[in-house]
Image (cartoon, rainbow, N blue to C red):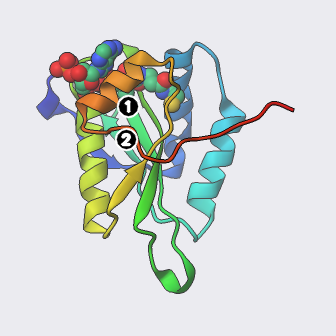
Amino acid sequence: MNESTIKIRLMQADDYDAVVGIDEKVLKASRPEYYGTKFEKLFKSKDYLPTSLVAEEEDGTVVGFVMGVLYMGEYGIYQEEATLDTIGVDPDYQRKGVGKQLINEFLDHLKRLGVQKINTLVDWNDSKLIHFFSANQFSPSKSINLERSL
Ligand SMILES: CC(C)(COP(=O)(O)OP(=O)(O)OC[C@H]1O[C@@H](n2cnc3c(N)ncnc32)[C@H](O)[C@@H]1OP(=O)(O)O)[C@@H](O)C(=O)NCCC(=O)NCCS
C-alpha cells in the first residue's frame, strides 16, 4: 500500500461495521452502542451536514475514518466552527500517512463549506494522539474544559 492507493470518500451509514471494527482494533474494546448513537445522529437527522470520511484500499476495504459534526443552524446556515469527533486508523495501516490524508481532506471539505475553525478534544495523557494533531497544525485553544467530581 502507498498513499496514492488509498481513496478518501464520504462515510455512509453502511460503513458502521467497518468503523466499529477499526475502533475495536485500536482500543481493544468494542463500542457498538456508542457508534450506533453517533450513526443515528449523523445519518438520520437532517440537522447535520455530512462531513465524516473513510479511507479505503483499492479493493474497498475501509482502513480508517474521521467523524465530524457540523451542525446546520436555523434557516440552513452552517456554523463557522465544526468538531472533529473521532479519528481512527487500522493499526496495520498506521504511520503510513492515512491519518494525515483523512485530516487534510476533512479540513478541505469543511473549508469549502465555509467553516473557519475546527475543534477537537484530546486526552491530556494520550501523547500519541496529541503528537498526531500537533503534526497536523492543531494547537491548544484558549478555552479550557473545567470539571468537578460530585
Ligand atoms: C492517531 C492516528 C489517527 C494517526 O493515524 P496514522 O495514519 O498513523 O497517522 P499518519 O501516518 O498520517 O501520521 C502523521 C503524523 O502524525 C504523527 N504521529 C502519528 N502517529 C504517531 C505516534 N504513534 N507517535 C508519535 N507521532 C505520531 C507523526 O508526526 C506522523 O508523521 P510521521 O509519520 O511523518 O512522523 C492513529 O494512530 C489512530 O487511529 N490512533 C488511535 C486514535 C484513537 O484512539 N481513536 C479512537 C478514539 S478517538
Q: CA distance from mark 1 to mark 2?
A: 6 Å
Label 1 sits on what residue type?
A: Gly
Residue 142 in view here? yes
Quarter of the figure that contains the N terminus: top left
For residue 54, which numbered disc appears in the image? Answer: 2
What x and y, as percent, mark residue 77? Answer: 46, 80
Residue 1 in view here? no
130 left or right of 25 in image: left
Q: Secondary structure at mark 1?
A: strand
What x and y, as percent, mark residue 11? Answer: 43, 49
Residue occupying the far bottom of the picture: 75
Residue at 28% across, 51% down: 107
Crowding near pointer 2: few (<14 within 10 Å), some, many (20+)? many
Q: Secondary structure at mark 2?
A: strand
For residue 23, which numbered disc appears in the image? Answer: none
Label 2 sits on what residue type?
A: Val
Disc 1 target residue: 64
Residue at 55% across, 40% down: 16
Residue at 63% across, 39% down: 35
